[in-house]
């Protein structure tokens, strides 16, 4: 039974990204009157679609990982993720091409993965199972932490945190932790490149995040039909069916305050009052745009300027005449000197001559993304976020030509002549067109000084009635934890607004396997 007054509690959400949509679903189910404001023409934020000339691309995330969290959110509102969003589990999950030589077709099948590892480093073949066993325990220890808010240093004394502490190993990076398992540098890279999902170097990223690679092998890498953007679109449809008012092409222009209490907002349609505000837009950009500096004690402009931010990405979205059926769905090329490449991105903040890159060839799995006889290529190159060393107005076309040459290293020799549609996104575009601070596509960095209680809190403590969801708050970046941030914030909001949080029903044991490691592809 919902506990609420005769007048429904009013919730406004800024940003229809994955976190905002998830929060909207949960708060609508709890009985709130929810209005969601999105400045773009379509939902999804960085998880939206780009469509042109019959081609469809994901703007940002293309790996759908660890479905468990979103599955539980769907069950909380009486829906079934697996029925609402058709998905294909990929095997191989991706191909790793090493500039230093060698290739791995990463598979969740333990015997086959052992063989893949043995082809490039026989002495490391048995280490895969040990890695999986250790990280299975690590995730079990850290899951309660990733599912709970961190509002002060005292939260570090919770029993769940103390139980997990021996597994944190703050003196080690992801790469250093993996050196305990693997001797071949290529294998350390194979199980650590996932730190780039957080926009960080594996040589700087805290050792906790070895769980990222584990999640891929344990729970699968999925492709939703229509891309990850299709998940956002389905969530928006469900939210609308639940009564959420989603207002596209409607920016929030101003917030209204009563002291430190946020009480309303203004868009081009007028003023809107609320009992709680959710900010799903880029944290650093939104704070500086909508919240006066004097109201931000902890996250004032000076601190935002001094904070550490993730890398950015250079993007090519290419509509291609014909197909590349011999290229896997996902291919990651690792630069010959990977440490140098990372140093150029993270410390020197210059462009690499031999950059690592990622290519999605999604039409080998999903023919809905391109006209018949054609295909899409999504090319992502990690680069430094905006800074004085790279002038993208001058480097845009030069770097684009280098990337086209670079993808020849995975067998794409004739791309230039087959391009029928092309869109380029640089760090400048991420900032100017997508309003992402410094073009840092993965938000605030995930170093130890910006994690847990040191990250902006889910219940934003500089202001009253304001909550955060998305990659700029706890637990961090990446779709699964962004969905988790929506759950954490929704629970806190329900408690404050005296609403009943919609708990999910248990997941049946005969579901698609997101809960069951034994359902790994054979």
Image: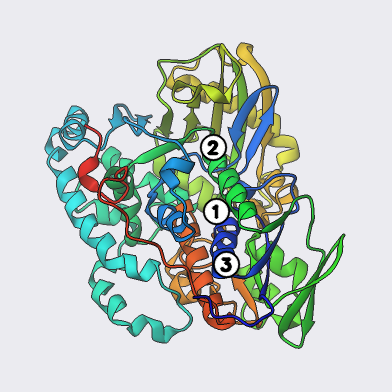
| Point 63% across, 25% down: residue | 55
- Image quarter hosting the C terminus: top left
Label at residue 27: 3
Q: CA distance from mark 3 to mark 2?
A: 37 Å
Q: On the image, numbered disc 1 is attached to which residue?
A: 442
Badge 1 crowding class, 10 Å Cα cut-off, few under 14, some 14 to 19, many 20 or more, is: many
Of the numbered discs 3 and 2, the one sitting upstream in the chain is 3
Helix, strand or loop at label 2? It is strand
The vertical placement of 163 against 289, above or below, is: below
| Point 59% across, 64% down: residue | 28
The vertical placement of 318 against 504, above or below, is: above
Of the numbered discs 1 and 3, the one sitting upstream in the chain is 3
> Which of pointers 3 and 2 indicates the residue nearer the eye?
3
> Which of pointers 1 and 3 indicates the residue nearer the eye?
3
Q: On the image, numbered disc 2 is attached to which residue?
A: 381
Q: Position of residue 132 (x, y in %)?
A: 20, 49
Do we see residue 36 in this rendering?
yes
Left or right: residue 476 compared with residue 443:
left
| Point 60% across, 61% down: residue | 24
Of the numbered discs 1 and 2, the one sitting upstream in the chain is 2
| Point 49% across, 34% down: residue | 357
């Amino acid at each position: 039974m919902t506990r609420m007054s005769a007048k429904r509690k009013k919730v406004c959400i800024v940003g229809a990204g994955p976190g905002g949509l998830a929060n909207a679903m949960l708060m609508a189910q709890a009985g709130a009157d929810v209005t969601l404001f999105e400045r773009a023409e379509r939902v999804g934020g960085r998880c939206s679609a780009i469509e042109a000339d019959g081609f469809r691309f994901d703007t940002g995330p293309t790996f759908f990982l660890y479905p468990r969290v979103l599955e539980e959110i769907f069950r909380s509102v009486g829906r079934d993720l697996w029925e609402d969003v058709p998905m294909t589990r990929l095997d191989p999950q991706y191909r790793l091409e090493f500039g230093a030589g060698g290739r791995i077709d990463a598979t969740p099948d333990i015997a086959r993965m052992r063989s893949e590892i043995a082809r490039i480093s026989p002495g490391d073949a048995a280490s895969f199972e040990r890695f999986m066993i250790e990280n299975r325990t690590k995730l079990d220890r850290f899951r309660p932490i990733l599912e709970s808010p961190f509002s002060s240093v005292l939260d570090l004394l919770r029993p769940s945190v103390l139980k997990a502490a021996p597994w944190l190993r703050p003196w080690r990076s992801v790469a250093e932790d993996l050196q305990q398992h693997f001797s071949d540098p290529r294998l350390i890279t194979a199980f650590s490149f996932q730190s780039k999902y957080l926009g960080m170097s594996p040589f700087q990223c805290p050792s906790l995040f070895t769980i990222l690679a584990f999640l891929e092998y344990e729970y699968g890498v999925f492709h939703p039909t229509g891309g990850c953007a299709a998940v956002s679109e389905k969530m928006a449809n469900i939210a609308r069916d639940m009564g959420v008012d989603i207002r596209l092409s409607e920016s929030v222009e101003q917030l209204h305050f009563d002291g430190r209490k946020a009480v309303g907002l203004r868009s081009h349609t007028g003023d809107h009052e609320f009992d709680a505000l959710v900010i799903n837009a880029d944290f650093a950009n939104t704070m500086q745009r909508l919240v006066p500096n004097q109201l931000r004690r902890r996250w004032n402009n000076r601190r935002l300027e001094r904070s550490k931010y993730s890398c950015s990405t250079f993007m090519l979205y290419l509509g291609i005449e014909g197909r590349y059926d011999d290229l896997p769905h996902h291919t990651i090329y690792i630069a010959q000197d990977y440490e140098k490449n990372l140093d150029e991105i993270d410390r020197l903040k210059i462009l690499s001559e031999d950059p690592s890159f990622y290519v999605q060839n999604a039409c080998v799995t999903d023919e809905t993304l391109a006209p018949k006889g054609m295909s899409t290529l999504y090319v992502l190159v990690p680069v430094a976020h905006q800074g004085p060393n790279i002038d993208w107005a001058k480097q845009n076309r030069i770097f684009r030509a280098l990337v086209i040459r670079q993808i020849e290293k995975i067998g794409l020799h004739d791309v230039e002549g087959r391009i029928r549609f092309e869109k380029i996104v640089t760090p400048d575009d991420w900032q100017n067109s997508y309003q992402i601070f410094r073009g840092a596509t993965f938000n605030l960095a995930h170093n130890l000084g910006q994690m847990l209680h040191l990250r902006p809190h889910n219940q934003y403590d500089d202001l009253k009635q304001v909550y955060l969801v998305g990659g700029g708050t706890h637990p961090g970046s990446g779709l699964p934890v962004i969905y988790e941030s929506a759950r954490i914030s929704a629970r806190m909001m329900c408690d404050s607004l005296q609403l009943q949080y919609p708990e999910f029903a248990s997941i049946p044991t005969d579901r698609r396997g997101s809960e069951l490691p034994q359902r790994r592809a054979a």
